[in-house]
Image: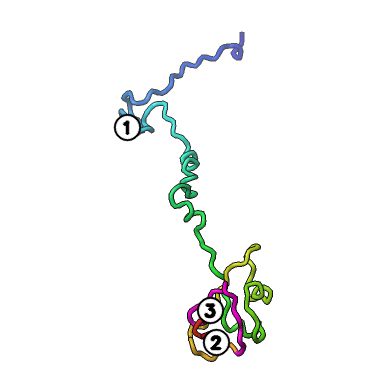
């Protein structure tokens, strides 16, 4: 018989916590709570996050507000740019504004169009030298409406 043939004996006992000794009654586990108990198992934090995903996405109350958070703003055209792009008596439509490069197409949809003035109702820089006909779907600022009359 040789040393490597001998059976290993494991006489080392598991450490018993909270039974007196140099570390005191709580033995570095603190007082009470889930972490101080034997057989403690704390579930991973990611599980809590997964559970609350639908709440964070905004289902339930106010869902429409969270899904459609940003309302589509109209495409803006300045009053002075129309003078260069259109001829006298021409009708201004959203389709023509896109063709002339004054606004860009958003996806495949025509966005609403708003014509903005320079803020001054009777300034010379913002006046049109041509008479234009505007489509009824085009929005206008107050100063533009005053200029058209």
Q: Nearer the viewer, residue 41 or 112?
A: 112
Q: Place residue 133 in its image quadrant.
A: bottom right
Furthest residue in direction bottom, as rendered: 124
Q: Measured from the top left, where is residue 49 in percent x and y? A: 48, 43
Tell me if I can see residue 49 in this picture: yes
Q: Nearer the viewer, residue 125 or 87?
A: 87
Drawn side of residue 48 relative to residue 135, left or right: left
Task: Look at the numbered discs 1 and 2 and tell me whether their residues touch, using CB distance below 8 Å.
Answer: no
Q: Dot 1: what SS?
A: loop
Mark 2 highlights which residue? 126
Q: Earlier in the sequence, mark 1 or mark 2?
A: 1
- The segment highlighted magenta reads 129-144
Q: Quadrant of the N terminus?
A: top right
Furthest residue in direction top, as rendered: 1
In the displayed structure, 4 sits above or below 41; it is: above
Q: Measured from the top left, where is residue 130 in percent x and y? A: 62, 88
Mark 1 highlights which residue? 32
Mark linked to residue 116: 3
Q: Residue at x 39, y 26 (%)?
A: 38
Q: Nearer the viewer, residue 112 or 48?
A: 112
Q: Dot 2: what SS?
A: loop
Drawn side of residue 106 relative to residue 36, left or right: right
């Amino acid at each position: 018989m040789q040393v490597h043939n001998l059976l290993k004996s494991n006489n080392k006992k598991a450490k018993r916590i909270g039974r007196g000794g140099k570390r005191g009654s709580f033995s570095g586990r603190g007082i009470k709570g889930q972490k101080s108990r034997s057989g403690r198992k704390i579930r991973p934090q990611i599980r809590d996050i997964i559970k609350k995903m639908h709440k964070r996405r905004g289902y339930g109350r106010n869902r429409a507000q969270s899904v459609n958070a940003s309302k589509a703003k109209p495409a803006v055209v300045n009053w002075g740019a129309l003078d260069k792009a259109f001829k006298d008596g021409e009708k201004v439509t959203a389709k023509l504004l896109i063709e002339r490069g004054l606004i860009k197409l958003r996806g495949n949809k025509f966005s609403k169009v708003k014509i903005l003035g320079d803020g001054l109702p009777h300034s010379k820089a913002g006046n049109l030298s041509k008479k234009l006909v505007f489509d009824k779907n085009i929005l206008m600022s107050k100063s533009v409406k005053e200029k058209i009359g």
